[in-house]
Amino acid sequence: MEQPKNFDDINFTSIHRKILLWGSGGPFLDGYVLVIIGIALEQLTPALKLDAQWAGLVGAATLAGLFIGTALFGYIADLFGRRLMFLIDIIAIAVISAATMFISSPLELVLMRFLIGIVIGADYPIATSMIAEFSPTRHRAFSMGFIAAMWYVGATAADIVGYLLYDVENGWRWMLGSAIVPCIMILLGRFHLPESPRWLVRKGRLEECKKMMRELFGTELTFGFEEPEPTRYRKIFEKRHLKMIVFIGIIWSCQVIPMFAIYTFGPQIIGLLGLEGGRESVLGNIVISLFFLIGCIPAMYWLNSIGRRPLLIGSFAVMTAALALLGLVPEPGIWMVVVAFAVYAFFSGGPGILQWLYPNELFPTDIRASAVGAAMSLSRIGTVLSTYALPIFIVNYGIAPTMLAGAGISLLGLLVSVAMAPETRGMSLEETSKLESC
């Protein structure tokens, strides 16, 4: 009788592709709603009489919501499973997007952006844990790379929608409500997806897992050894896990703070750096979005060929140099601006994937979503403060010091990566969840 195959060694099947595609819907929506507000602000600022402080609050509100959503719902996903929350959060995103179309004051806008941040934040630990736990070892880096790429697909889609609606009267309402369309598509795609098999095993629901394996793959597949264990949130504060959360939180912050600043206030920044303002600056943002997206593609393969640690260190080094160039060169020409941003965007692909890959590799199944949520929440402390402060900082100090501040943040990511980044290439989730940092 043929022995069951190990789950980590099976081929990529249609069910893997479905989980990867529809599970990536959350990152797609995150990229979409974050970027669309940056374009909508061009109309919202005069319509709602937003000053620099209100603009900063609008940008920071979504990130503050993400802080709460990731921390809270990661734990809920570990308690009750991935699939249920997988559906609820998408419905909530659609409802809030619809409600945002009818706001009439700055306070209402900030509140809606805060709420949508909570529900999008909920999807991060749920979706990434589901995808990581379903992915065979040799496909895990590609799967996490696909998640990162879908963030940029969402961002690019938002740029295109914003460009088309830029000159439409009250176009900002349609921009902010347009997220309803992908929400409906994602909800329909997720409706028939199964529960995570590793979560079922960890919860002691072995017969349910075996039945699901037979239905999906025609045989009972084995897993690396993980004893059934209840979820206890305090476990993430154990010395080894807390150290990993701090490491991931720092590199995540250092990757996303400059990136979120570029996206949230992209049209304004590009205009200040020399490109034409208004609608044409959105075209510049589309070009940058495409370079962010393109950068993910080779990084998906470099993570397995070069390795996680070397790619992270090399990427942060190049990203630091690109932002420093914009800060040090007085009055950079249009081409220098575009090239520097494009280089930064392209090489952010490695760290952009690793901010999803590392937290899902480095923690056991019973606290994986909780740890992903905690690491992401830690990273959002810096992004909330920086996104609020960015428009105020630009007004008071100018664009060159702002770029140098971004370079300093990337430099911190480089130093922490050299000191702490582990190598997880080719290891099962059971092996990576026991690794110590470098």
Image (cartoon, helix red, strand yellow):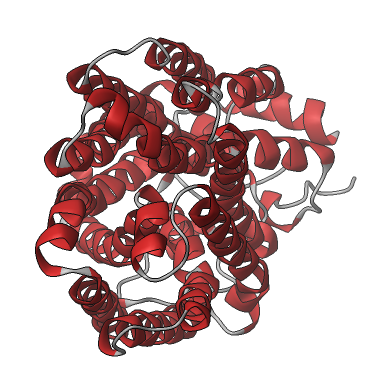
- Residue at image location 38% in from the left, 16% down from the top: 100
Q: Which residue is at the front of the view, 396 or 25? A: 396
Front residue (pair 416, 82): 416
Q: Is residue 231 visible?
A: no
Give percent across and percent down for residue 303: 58, 74
- Image position of 417 with respect to 175: above or below: below
In the figure, is residue 279 to the left or right of 249? right
Number of marks in the rendered image? 0
Q: Residue at x 29, y 76 (%)?
A: 410
Q: Quadrant of residue 43?
A: top left
Q: Residue at x 35, y 54 (%)?
A: 268
Left or right: residue 259 versus residue 334 is left
**Lateral position of residue 331 relative to residue 233, left or right:** right
Percent position of residue 291, x then y = 59, 67
Of all residues, the one furthest to the right in this rendering is: 1
Q: Could you say where residue 89 lies in the image, as x and y percent from the top left?
A: 45, 20
Q: Position of residue 109 (x, y in %)?
A: 27, 22
Q: Judge left or right: residue 94 versus residue 56.
A: right
For the residue pair 19 and 431, the one nearer the viewer reads as 19
Closer to the camera in the image, 13 or 297: 297
Residue under the image location 59 percent in, 35 percent down = 25
Q: Residue furthest left?
A: 396
Quadrant that contains the N terminus: top right
Q: Can residue 72 be seen?
A: yes
